[in-house]
């Protein structure tokens, strides 16, 4: 895990040098162990290092080939690098380090960029500079675990691990309306947008090639579509167990201490089971909020005792929770996921004893564990029994009584059955909650352009939802939450459920097999009942939640009131400030703010901290860029 940055097509060397220094400095928390730079005739590379493999200077970056022709900056972990290294050594390659990074240099020279990337098993984002060809390659892992952003001009291209780094380098434009709309709808900026104009996110499973001021990009992998399977349910469970155990084993390999996260649920329980089975000596950590209905520490403690692993509960109560400013500092774009506060607290505590943490992220996404998966699964079945005429009439009726109170669930199910996935997202897409509270400013009061998510290929509602969210919420919220929190404290997070081989297996399984009989992630629950205990396998999904909406009208009440006094959002026409103040007062009476008000609270505070040029460039007094003549030196 690290922070990477680079500028290619350099014309003004002094300006580029200052920009790169600022970019690298802004990512110091991603790589607290070391800093490195390389200056080449048409490229400059920078790196912040978090040492996981080969802690010696031989693993430092930017790393070059022995002849200085190839250079790389890399963020992530290649779990099969020892296998690839052995293969490359049979081809005559000689390695100078024991790091996974060096595999990229030899692999590119031996196989070319796409064959190399296809061989990589892990999470990665890297920039590889081919100096003789004056060519840059950027690559991002299959699922988008590691971030990579870039800004392309007429001649130059700059890239980095974070949006904040490119802003620091002077490559950010104005705030994007489309990105703000994402935050209002979802609580995060999606992968298709960036909070600043002029910056783009390299999509997951994508390679970008730059040469002579021009760039192109292409995808090297797609998640397999579901297909009919001859596997029985029991056979699928056995195959999932085998794949999970292998994925966990790969992620325990490190030259530094490793820890694990343990909630009271299925996914992290299975991860800890596999760790115990493999005989690893680790401590599992759980977030606890005493006397809170969302607290899962007791269930987690039972799982730890059953598995025989060390367990530590971290109190997230009064005085222990990160404040809103830490949330703003950890994420380079507006990010309102309240559970990120818990992840930050966990990361802060784990960082005192470990530099790698294994998590259960991805199990719900791959094996279908969210309630919305079952809702659409049921709606799809119901749709087969509804005549087209009845569906048309239902969609024309706008009767609130049929969609509220005790009829709310039934009404929603009929909406989904007759309107498909579009109906599921209708209120979110149209900002219905904000409109009902009168919170929108003039710029968003007009009807928004409708987006359609219906599946043209007939794969089904659940498959359509999963495909849509894989390119949006999965990467931009779930993966970003973990990466942002752990990297803020210099920790590498590894998620076995994101293993590409396990993903290839799980995605191809029919939805009906993964939701057998309507049971959420039925395959993993069967595994949990077998290895973790009946309780873990049957426990209702609760999610990792922090009561931020309640805290906004209690411990953060004063901050909330200050936030909505002459807010920037209102000055720029995105928010009705008076309505926000009124809604905050009503929320205090209720004892809980709405999700919409929480989103606006975070967004406004983020804008206040990031609205100006907070990183003026200044001449360097301590960086030492090696000159081009030193390119052949060993790393």
Image: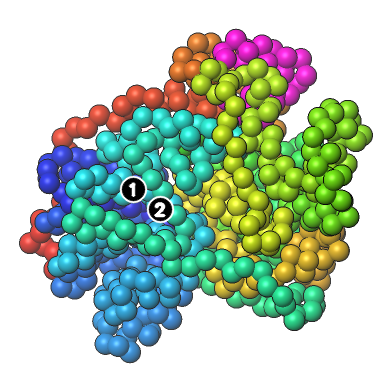
Tell me: 632 left or right of 19: left
- Quadrant of the frame with the C terminus: bottom left
Residue 254 visible somewhere in the drawing: no
Range covered by the magenta-colored residues? 576-601
| Res. 614 visible in picture | yes
**How far across and down, in percent of the image, does residue 293 sit?**
80, 38
Q: Quadrant of residue 527?
A: bottom right
Q: Is residue 276 left or right of residue 178?
A: right
Question: Residue at left 19%, top 40%?
Answer: 18
At label 2, counting other C-alpha atoms closer than 10 Å, the crowd grade (few under 14, some 14-19, many 20 or more) is many
Question: Which residue position is annotated with label 2?
Answer: 202
Q: Which residue is mark 1?
A: 150
What's the distance in space between the residues labelled 2 and 1, CA to CA?
Answer: 7 Å
Magenta portion: prevailing SS class: helix
The answer to whether the residues at label 2 and label 1 have Cβ atoms under 8 Å apart is yes
Picture layout, residue 617 above or below residue 63: above
Q: Is residue 338 above or below residue 296?
A: above
């Amino acid at each position: 895990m690290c922070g990477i940055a680079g500028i290619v097509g350099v014309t003004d060397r002094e300006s580029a040098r200052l920009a790169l220094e600022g970019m690298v400095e802004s990512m110091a928390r991603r790589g607290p162990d070391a800093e490195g730079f390389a200056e080449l005739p048409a490229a400059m590379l920078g790196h912040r290092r978090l040492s996981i493999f080969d802690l010696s200077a031989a693993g430092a970056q930017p790393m070059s080939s022995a002849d200085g022709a190839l250079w790389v900056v890399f963020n992530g972990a290649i779990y099969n690098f020892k296998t690839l290294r052995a293969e490359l050594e049979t081809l005559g390659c000689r390695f100078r380090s024991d790091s996974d990074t060096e595999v990229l240099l030899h692999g590119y020279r031996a196989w070319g960029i796409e064959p190399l990337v296809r061989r990589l098993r892990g999470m990665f984002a890297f920039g590889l500079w081919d100096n003789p060809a004056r060519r840059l390659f950027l690559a991002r892992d299959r699922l988008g675990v590691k971030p990579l952003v870039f800004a392309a001009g007429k001649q130059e291209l700059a890239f980095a691990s974070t949006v904040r780094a490119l802003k620091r380098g002077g490559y950010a434009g104005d705030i994007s309306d489309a990105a703000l709309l994402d935050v209002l709808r979802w609580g995060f900026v999606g992968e298709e947008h960036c909070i600043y104009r002029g910056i783009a996110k390299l999509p997951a499973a994508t390679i970008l090639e730059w040469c002579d001021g021009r760039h192109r990009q292409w995808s090297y992998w797609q998640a397999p579509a579901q297909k009919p399977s001859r596997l029985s349910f029991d056979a699928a469970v056995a195959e999932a167990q085998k794949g999970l155990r292998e994925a966990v084993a790969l992620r325990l390999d490190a030259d530094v201490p490793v820890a694990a996260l343990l909630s009271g649920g299925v996914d992290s329980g299975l991860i800890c089971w596999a760790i115990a089975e493999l005989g690893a000596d680790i401590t599992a950590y759980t977030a606890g909020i005493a006397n809170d209905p969302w607290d899962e520490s007791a269930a987690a403690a039972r799982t730890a005792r059953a598995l025989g692993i060390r367990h530590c509960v971290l109190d997230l109560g009064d005085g222990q929770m990160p404040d809103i400013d830490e949330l703003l500092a950890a994420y380079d774009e507006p990010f309102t996921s309240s559970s990120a506060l818990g992840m930050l607290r966990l990361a802060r505590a784990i960082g005192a004893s470990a530099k790698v943490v294994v998590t259960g992220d991805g199990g719900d996404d791959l094996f279908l564990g969210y309630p919305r998966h079952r809702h659409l699964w049921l709606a799809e079945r119901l749709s087969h029994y509804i005549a087209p005429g009845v569906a048309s009439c239902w969609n024309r009726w706008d009767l609130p009584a049929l969609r509220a109170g005790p009829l709310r669930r039934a009404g929603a199910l009929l909406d989904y059955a007759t309107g498909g996935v579009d109906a599921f997202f209708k209120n979110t897409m149209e900002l219905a909650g904000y409109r009902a509270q009168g919170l929108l400013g003039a710029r968003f009061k007009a009807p928004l352009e409708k987006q359609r998510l219906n599946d043209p290929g007939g794969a089904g509602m659940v498959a359509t939802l999963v495909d849509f969210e894989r390119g949006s919420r999965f990467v931009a919220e779930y993966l970003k939450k973990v990466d942002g929190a752990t990297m803020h404290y210099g920790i590498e997070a590894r998620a076995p459920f994101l293993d590409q081989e396990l993903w290839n297996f799980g995605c191809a399984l029919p939805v009906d097999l993964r939701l057998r009989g309507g049971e959420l992630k039925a395959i993993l629950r069967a595994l949990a009942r077998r290895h973790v205990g009946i309780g873990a396998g049957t426990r209702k999904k609760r999610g990792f939640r922090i009561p931020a909406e309640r805290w906004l009208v209690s411990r953060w009440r004063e901050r909330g009131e200050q936030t909505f006094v002459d807010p920037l959002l209102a000055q720029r026409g995105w928010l009705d400030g008076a309505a926000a103040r009124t809604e905050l007062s009503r929320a205090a009476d209720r004892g809980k703010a709405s999700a919409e008000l929480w989103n606006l609270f975070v967004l406004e505070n983020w804008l206040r901290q990031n609205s100006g040029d907070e990183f003026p460039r200044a001449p360097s007094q301590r960086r030492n860029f090696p000159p081009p003549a030193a390119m052949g030196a060993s790393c």
